Amino acid sequence: MTPETVMEIGRNALAVTVMLAAPMLIIALVLGLVIGMIQAATQIQEMTLSFIPKLLGLVAVLAVGGHWMLGLIVDYTRDLIQAIPGLLLG
């Protein structure tokens, strides 16, 4: 296994991680900003107020994109496992 192969596997792993995490992080960020603006406008500074909308947003993202996310990680894992003989012999 060459250093280039290791770097490629690591790069692919990071790309898959970013693709899996980005939808959830973006929704949590947007909902956090919206709830923060509402809290600032109404001067309600309850810390738990932003928890439920974020939780519901993440559940919605998982409900809508969960199939795609699962397919992505399964495909990556399958490709990685199938590449093991070539990595050991090559």
Image (cartoon, rainbow, N blue to C red):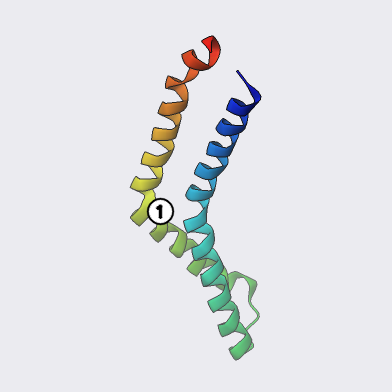
Q: Give x and y (percent) for residue 59.
A: 42, 57
SS assignment at label 1: helix
Mark 1 crowd level (few <14, some 14–19, many ≥20, 10 Å Cα): some
Tell me if residue 72 comes above or below residue 26 in the rendering.
above
| Amino acid type of the residue that numbered disc 1 sits on in the rendered structure | Leu
State how many labels appear.
Answer: 1
Q: Is residue 81 left or right of residue 4?
A: left
Q: Give x and y (percent) for residue 78.
A: 41, 27
Give the quarter of the image for residue 8.
Answer: top right
Residue at the farthest top position = 89
Foreground: 89 or 84?
Answer: 89
Residue at (62%, 21%) from the top-left corner?
A: 2
Residue at (49%, 64%) from the top-left corner?
A: 27
Q: Give x and y (percent) for residue 74.
A: 40, 34
Q: Give x and y (percent) for residue 25.
A: 54, 59
Residue tagged by mark 1? 62
Tell me if residue 58 comes above or below residue 72 in the rendering.
below
Foreground: 23 or 38?
Answer: 23
Give the quarter of the image for residue 79.
Answer: top left
Q: Is residue 60 left or right of residue 34?
A: left
Residue at (47%, 13%) from the top-left corner?
A: 85
Which quadrant does the N terminus fall into?
top right
Foreground: 18 or 34?
Answer: 18
